[in-house]
Image (tube, rainbow, N blue to C red):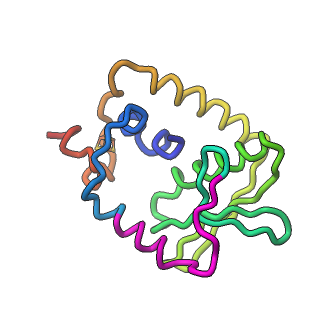
C-alpha cells in the first residue's frame, strides 16, 4: 500500500478494496522471472509480521533486500523498504535495507532516520484516509498509466 501511495492513490484504493486486474500484466511476469532467476543462493521470501522480504542477510546486523526490475521508478520501491525498516524498528529490530537491480548490477542502501520515521507516520495516516473513501480518488494521468493494468478502467 505504501508503494501504491507513492505511485497512484487511485490504485491504492483499488488494491485495498481487492479490485485486481493484474492477470496478464507483462511487467509483473517479467518482474517475477527476474526475482526467480536472481540471487539463487539466498533464502527467498522471508516473512515477518505482515511483510515479505525478498531475502535477508545477517552479517554485521540484519539487512533486508528487495529485488527490483528497474531503477527507473525507484521512489515507490524505496518507500516500501522504508516502511519495512520502520515496522521492524517498532518491533525492536534495527535493520538496514537495500534495493537491488540485478539487470543493472546496481544496489542502493536505505537507512531509517527520524525524518523518515515522521514521514512514514504521516503516510500511514494518509493511507487510512484514502482507503476509507467510499469511491476511488479521481484519475490523475501519469506517464506510466499506459502500462498500468487499470488503464482501461481509468481511461476508456
Ligand atoms: S491507470 Fe493511472 S490513474 Fe489509473 S490506476 Fe493506473 S496509474 Fe492510477
Residue 116 percent location from the top left of the image: 71, 42
Name the outermost residue toward the top.
134
Image point (61%, 49%), residue name: 51
Q: Is residue 119 magenta?
A: no
Residue 47 percent location from the top left of the image: 63, 54
Image point (54%, 54%), residue name: 77
- For the C terminus, the quadrant is top left
Residue 95 percent location from the top left of the image: 78, 56
85 w.r.t. 34: above or below = above
36 w.r.t. 27: above or below = below
39 w.r.t. 121: above or below = below
Relative to residue 126, is residue 4 drawn left or right?
left
Number of numbered discs present? 0
Image point (33%, 46%), residue name: 142
Residue 56 percent location from the top left of the image: 69, 65
Q: Is residue 37 magenta?
A: yes
Quarter assignment of residue 69: bottom left
Figure quadrant, ligand 1: top left
Image point (72%, 34%), residue name: 118
Relative to residue 150, is residue 56 drawn left or right?
right
The range drawn in magenta is 29-47
Amino acid at each position: 500500500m505504501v508503494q501504491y501511495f507513492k505511485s497512484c492513490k487511485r490504485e491504492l484504493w483499488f488494491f485495498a478494496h481487492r479490485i485486481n486486474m493484474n492477470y496478464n500484466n507483462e511487467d509483473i511476469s517479467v518482474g517475477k522471472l527476474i526475482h526467480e532467476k536472481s540471487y539463487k543462493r539466498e533464502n527467498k521470501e522471508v516473512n515477518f509480521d505482515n511483510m515479505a522480504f525478498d531475502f535477508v542477510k545477517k552479517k554485521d546486523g540484519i539487512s533486508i533486500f528487495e529485488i527490483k526490475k528497474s531503477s527507473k521508478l525507484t521512489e515507490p520501491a524505496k518507500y516500501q523498504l522504508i516502511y519495512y525498516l520502520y515496522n521492524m524498528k517498532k518491533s525492536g529490530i534495527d535493520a538496514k535495507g537495500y534495493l537491488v537491480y540485478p539487470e543493472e548490477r546496481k544496489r542502493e542502501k536505505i537507512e531509517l532516520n527520524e525524518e523518515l520515521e515522521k514521514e512514514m507516520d504521516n503516510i500511514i495516516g494518509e493511507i487510512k484516509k484514502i482507503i476509507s473513501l467510499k469511491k476511488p480518488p479521481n484519475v490523475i494521468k501519469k506517464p506510466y498509466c499506459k502500462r498500468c493494468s487499470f488503464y482501461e478502467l481509468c481511461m476508456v
